[in-house]
Image (cartoon, rainbow, N blue to C red):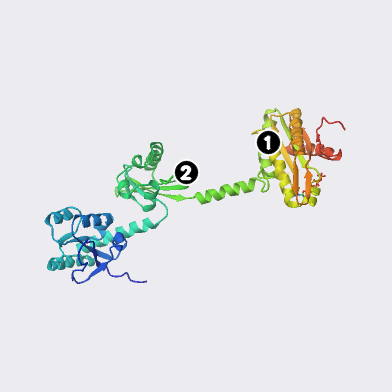
């Protein structure tokens, strides 16, 4: 394992004027002002000496100062020139110390005192390593892509990571100490607060899927994992939680579901979905009676269409046919491709006469269709067999067999026609 580099005393020069010279203090190392923006990432820094030459330079430092810095990396303000009012101000803020930039003796003493932070057995050393551990933990959780948060027993946020800040759209400073009512829309906040309350009461863990809206307006499918943590007395002391983004998985699941239930070429139900949906309708019919009819449809001489115009034109013919049928369907009708050029149409709430009318309307619409390719063009036509479910029917298959028999008769009679049990032999 590589040993961590020894912590360093850094010198950051933010003077707006001057020669940029570093005071000759042993162990002091310059860092570029551009790196000064990331001083919290310098996890091997012992302290930062910051040279400023007035209020503007100090304001620049305050902008750069990460909230974690004062705890983990004390900063010492070096004033050039010394300004007692500014010195009082920086000490009232969170500077570890302050002196004139040319007061080398004082600076040596400050550095020596800060050096004690290297000794893990000294109080300063313990405080430094605690603060360092805190920064390292925070840095580690900030690197995680999943939002993380902790709330105390009153529902106030006491910790969070960068991903949680992005989710909420507010800085950690604004989030810590706030409740969910301060950071989320009221309707959602009530739901979250109730869920938290239930978890605090019952203890243990909780996980559930939800859709959340990020501050940037994007919606994500997530799994919340929340867990109660306990005080030394054994009382529930708060909740820690995370959200795992499962949007991609959900998207994939939806795509798989569509792929498994629809016909790739035409986008309508496949045979599996037909049996699922039509089975439900047939069971409802068996229980409650009513009208339920079936139309089976087959394109005429489709092999010739393929042979003359090519397979791509054949595909186009199938899509044109489907579009024509969809134009005459109601919401409850179940339309599916049974395979090849054969289709099924189940019509709930429709008796035989109504189903024959629907099939005729489709036949006429298809007869107006034409597919073309460089090889020529072909008029389409269909044959259809229609029947209705009867009280004695034991299964949907029995109904399909009757409709198939009518389709066979329509083909045999010359195609481009609709046959049903009402059609004379
Ligand atoms: N282009 C295309 N052709 C298909 C597809 N699936 C099946 N076919 C073709 O559809 C044709 C069906 O032909 P057949 O079942 O012999 O019947 P037909 O030529 O329509 O004759 P009849 O039904 O008796 O009028 C076959 O040539 C299959 O190759 C498909 O997805 N795309």
Position of residue 284 relative to residue 67, above or below, is above
**Dot label at residue 327:** 1
Quadrant for the C terminus, please: top right
The tag earlier along the polypeptide, 2 or 1, is 2
Q: Quadrant of residue 413?
A: top right
Residue 391: percent from left, percent from top: 74, 29
Position of residue 389 relative to residue 315, above or below, is above
Q: Quadrant of residue 143?
A: bottom left
Q: Is 159 displayed left or right of 105 in the figure?
A: right
**Dot label at residue 131:** none
Which residue carries the number 2 mark?
211
> Real-space Cα distance between discs 2 and 1?
35 Å
Residue 68: percent from left, percent from top: 28, 56
Label 1 CB sits under 8 Å from any ligand 1 atom:
no
**Residue pictured at 45% horizontal, 51% vertical:** 244
Residue 129: percent from left, percent from top: 26, 62
Q: How many marks?
A: 2
Residue 161: percent from left, percent from top: 36, 52
Residue 244 seen in this snapshot: yes
Q: Is 319 displayed left or right of 61 in the figure?
A: right
Which mark's residue is nearer the viewer, 2 or 1?
A: 1
Q: Nearer the viewer, residue 45 or 84?
A: 84
SS label for mark 1: loop
Position of residue 391 relative to residue 18, above or below, is above
Label 2 CB sits under 8 Å from any ligand 1 atom:
no
Q: Nearer the viewer, residue 417 or 19?
A: 19
SS label for mark 2: strand
């Amino acid at each position: 394992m590589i040993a961590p580099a020894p912590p360093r005393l850094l010198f950051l020069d933010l003077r707006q004027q001057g020669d940029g010279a570093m005071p000759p203090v042993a162990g002091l190392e310059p860092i570029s002002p551009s790196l000064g923006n990331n001083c919290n990432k310098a996890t091997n820094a012992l302290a930062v000496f910051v040279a400023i030459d007035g209020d503007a330079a100090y304001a620049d430092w305050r902008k750069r100062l990460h909230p974690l810095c004062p705890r983990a990396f004390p900063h010492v303000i070096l004033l050039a020139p010394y300004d007692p009012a500014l010195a009082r101000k920086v000490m009232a803020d969170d500077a570890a110390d302050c002196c004139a930039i040319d007061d080398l003796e004082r600076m040596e003493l400050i550095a020596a005192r800060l050096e004690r932070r290297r000794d893990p057995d000294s109080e300063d050393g313990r405080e430094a390593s605690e603060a360092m551990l805190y920064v390292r933990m925070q840095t580690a959780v900030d690197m995680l892509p999943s939002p993380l948060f902790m709330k105390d027993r009153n529902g106030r946020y006491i910790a969070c990571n960068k991903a949680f800040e992005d989710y909420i759209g507010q800085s950690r400073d604004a989030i810590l100490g706030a409740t969910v009512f301060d950071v989320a829309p009221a309707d959602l906040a009530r739901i979250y607060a109730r869920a938290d309350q239930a978890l605090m009461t019952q203890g243990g863990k909780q996980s559930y899927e939800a859709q959340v809206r990020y501050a940037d307006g994007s919606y994500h499918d997530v799994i919340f994992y929340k867990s109660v943590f306990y005080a030394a007395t054994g009382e529930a002391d708060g909740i820690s939680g995370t959200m795992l983004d499962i949007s991609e998985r959900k998207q994939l699941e939806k795509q798989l579901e569509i792929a498994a239930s629809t016909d790739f070429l035409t986008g309508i139900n496949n045979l599996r979905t037909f049996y699922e949906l039509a089975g439900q309708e047939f069971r409802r019919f068996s229980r409650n009676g009513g009208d339920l009819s079936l139309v089976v449809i087959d394109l005429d001489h489709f092999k010739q269409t393929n042979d003359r115009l090519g397979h791509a034109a054949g595909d186009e013919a199938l899509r044109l046919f489907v579009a024509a049928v969809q134009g005459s369907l109601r919401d409850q009708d179940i339309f599916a491709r049974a395979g090849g050029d054969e289709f099924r149409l189940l019509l709930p709430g429709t008796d035989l006469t109504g189903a024959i009318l629907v099939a005729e309307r489709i036949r006429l619409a298809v007869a107006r269709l034409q597919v073309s390719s460089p090889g020529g063009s072909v008029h389409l036509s269909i044959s259809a067999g229609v029947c209705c479910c009867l009280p004695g029917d034991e299964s949907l298959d029995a109904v399909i067999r009757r409709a198939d028999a009518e389709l066979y008769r329509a083909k045999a009679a010359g195609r481009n026609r609709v046959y049903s049990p009402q059609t004379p032999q």
